[in-house]
Amino acid sequence: MAATVVKGALVIDGTGRTPIEGGAVLIEDGRIRAVGGAADIGVPEGAAVIDLGPETILPGLVDAHTHLSIIPGLGHQIGQLRSNAAQAALRAIPNMRTDFLSGVTTMRVVGEEHFLDIDIKAAVNAGRIPGPRLLVATRPIAARHGHGTALTASDGPEEIRRHIRENLAAGADLIKYFATGGTSSARAAADTCFYSPEEIRLIVEEAHRDGRPAAVHAHGGPAIRYSVEAGVDTIEHGKLATAADLELMRNAGTWLVCNHAIAFHPDGIEKGDGGNPQIMAKLKISRERSPGTFRLALNSGVRWALGTDSMHGLLWFEAQKAVDFGATAEQALAAVTRNAAEAIGLKDSVGTLEPGKHADVISVRGNPLAEIGALRNVGLILKGGVRYDHLSAQ
């Protein structure tokens, strides 16, 4: 593959160092070879040049929490997970394309039935369909009487262990379990814990024994403490977390993966489930508590990243809400690049523009460090050095 040089008015490499004015990124064989001033890097003989003029060059965005086949605005999200494989795939492929064209070049998929995400990941890796680099959890581990239970229910040590091992055998990159209630289902409060401490320890131990991380859907209540004490790698959502929960997480080095678009964007839960009074009551609590909980997280020093939770194409909105709730633009940008990559275990390959990493490079019109909403205006999209922004015209 011939070398490529990408030039722009500003390069924000995601490492936290000062942005480079008149910067450039040199790409060879799908990897970043150099980042710096355009005059310093130069143009190797035979290299292609992509001159983006006034645009800002960034690392490809990382969505740390999503589902391929869910569209919150359609409502009944668990019902969507229960749909047949063909219907799920028909939703998943356009959803993934929308994410990709929003500048997301890496996604962690935290729950699909039918091993759908395994097959889609294989298709993306083989070049049969365009899409972000995927980490997949496949079937979530969820109790029969709990939130998140679609076609696969897991109760008690034997069944939990068997389903985890089946997931791992199929190619799961991580194990995802639902420990608490959720906003998008009516049955139980979002801080209800459906698994015992012993079952939670078993889930985390089974994942770690195979060298895989464990992620837990946990809004609040005792499930956060049980999971952190068991060694879970990421707490997903945490919208009802207390200061004590966040201190425990900080001390343990546990990541918090936040999302707010599903509760605050007009195409989220309210659009799909606005006619369900139980869900709307829970959504009201989420909206009231989320800003304060997020500020607690900022003050606690806990490590955090952002994901869209199936709000496809709206990672920019997640970053915007983080700023609205008290984060700096620098923190919000890190939460969808460097920190998100670290939270999902890919800090050595994506999330920043550094030599040796995958050449996942995007551009935006404007400077997101001055106005985080600039992330909405994506131009160039390179994944592994291959250009994909032309897909938007198809």
Image (spheres, helix red, strand yellow):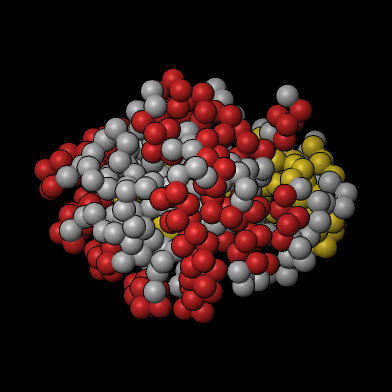
Q: x and y percent of residue 20 in the render?
A: 78, 63
Q: x and y percent of residue 168 in the render?
A: 28, 39
Q: Is residue 386 above or below residue 366?
A: above
Residue closest to the eye, 97 or 57: 97
Q: Is residue 369 above or below residue 144?
A: below
Which residue occupies 63% across, 36% down?
98
Q: x and y percent of residue 274 in the render?
A: 52, 45
Residue closest to the eye, 308 or 187: 187
Is residue 256 rendered to the left or right of residue 133? left
Residue closest to the eye, 340 or 221: 221
Which residue occupies 44% across, 38% down?
76
Q: Dividing the image into 4 quarters, which one contains the N terminus?
A: top right
Which residue occupies 54% across, 22% down?
128
Which residue occupies 48% across, 71% down?
293
Q: x and y percent of residue 247 in the render?
A: 38, 78
Query: Can residue 18 be seen from the camera position used here?
Result: yes
